Amino acid sequence: MKGPLFYSKILLFGEYGIIKDSKGLSIPYNFYNGALKSSDNFTESQEKSNKNLERFVSYLEQLQNENPEMVTFDITALRQDIANGLYFDSSIPQGYGVGSSGALVAAIYDQYAKNKITILENLTREKLLKLKAIFGEMESFFHGKSSGLDPLNSYLSLPILINSKDNIETTGIPSQTEKGKQAVFLIDSGIIGETAPMVNIFMDKMKKEGFRKMLKDKFVKHTDACVEDFLKGDAKSLFGNMKKLSKVVLHNFKPMIPKQFHQIWKEGIESGAYYLKLCGSGGGGYILGFTQDIDKAKKILKDYPLEVVYNF
């Protein structure tokens, strides 16, 4: 058995903010992918994945018992396939904020959900929200509360614009220009990030009025502006707003930024050579960067493993 490929994703804008109704923009990242496969002779990582699926199927069974109107699965077939050596074969790094559990959730839904919403249908807002809700419940198994956005992106393989919690749509993004000097890039922090502890820190901060005010007046405001600028292709305004966003994140989300990156984060803001932001929940994994001159940014950041995601 070999299932279709599901890709990783990058949330360009909206991490943490979408919990509080900011805009968000998520794009598929085809560099990494995963697919369901089966084997009767496991490697260590395949066996780990198979055992993980065993636990996941028990969770899915409980989910459908509690909420059969929402989603039901062919649990018998899934259990049988797991017994026959089903595992998720993935090149998506775990704990890097690029949607490793999202791709797995999308693959399981695609293969085993009954009455599934398919990507060939006319995807109305209602259908997108229903999919997002199902995926959110499924993915909660992996790291506490999930928005369902990562699996949705992986399942559709299309950019998704989040206008608010109840208003999401698929969208087009400005086409890439191969020779474009402006770029979005990833820096590998070399640390595996865990989502749940980071989300807990955030929820703890949300208890303080000052933090909530900063989130609404600065973080959400700058995030929304960046999303609008990016979609319009207004680079001048985008980099102005990126600078503000990068500054707000450095000052208010320090625990989510690995210590050894505080200095280069600050240097980017001061020099204007690049602006860094969180990629997913932070705490490790990838850090996302935006620059108006990728060659210049590469020179300055030569000591860090850097991957260009998008040129424009």
Image (spheres, rainbow, N blue to C red):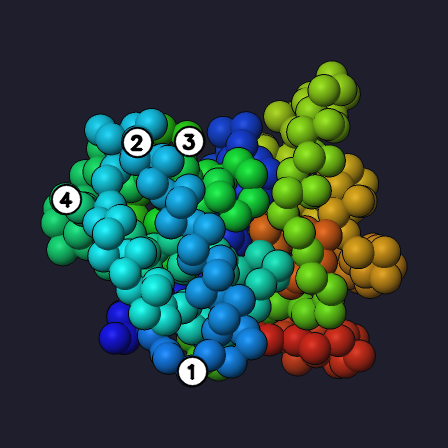
- Return the mark for residue 41: 1
Label 1 vs 3, first from the N-terminus: 1
Q: Are marks 3 and 2 in contact (CB under 8 Å)?
A: no
Distance (Cα) linking label 1 and label 3: 46 Å
Q: Nearer the viewer, mark 1 or mark 2?
A: 1
Question: Which amino acid type is shown beneath numbered disc 4?
Answer: Asn
Q: Position of residue 88 (x, y in %)?
A: 41, 68
Q: Quadrant of residue 30?
A: bottom left
Up the image or down, 16 lies above or below 86; here it is above
Q: Which residue is mark 3?
A: 164
Q: Are marks 4 and 2 in contact (CB under 8 Å)?
A: no
Q: Nearer the viewer, mark 4 or mark 1?
A: 1
Question: Which amino acid type is shown beneath numbered disc 1?
Answer: Asn
| Secondary structure found at label 4 | loop
| Secondary structure found at label 2 | helix
Question: Which amino acid type is shown beneath numbered disc 2?
Answer: Asn
- Return the mark for residue 264: none
Q: Quadrant of residue 233?
A: bottom left
Label 4 vs 2, first from the N-terminus: 2
Q: Position of residue 235 (x, y in %)?
A: 53, 57
| Secondary structure found at label 3 | strand
Residue closest to the eye, 66 or 163: 66
Write the residue at 25% across / 37% down.
71
Distance (Cα) linking label 4 and label 1: 33 Å
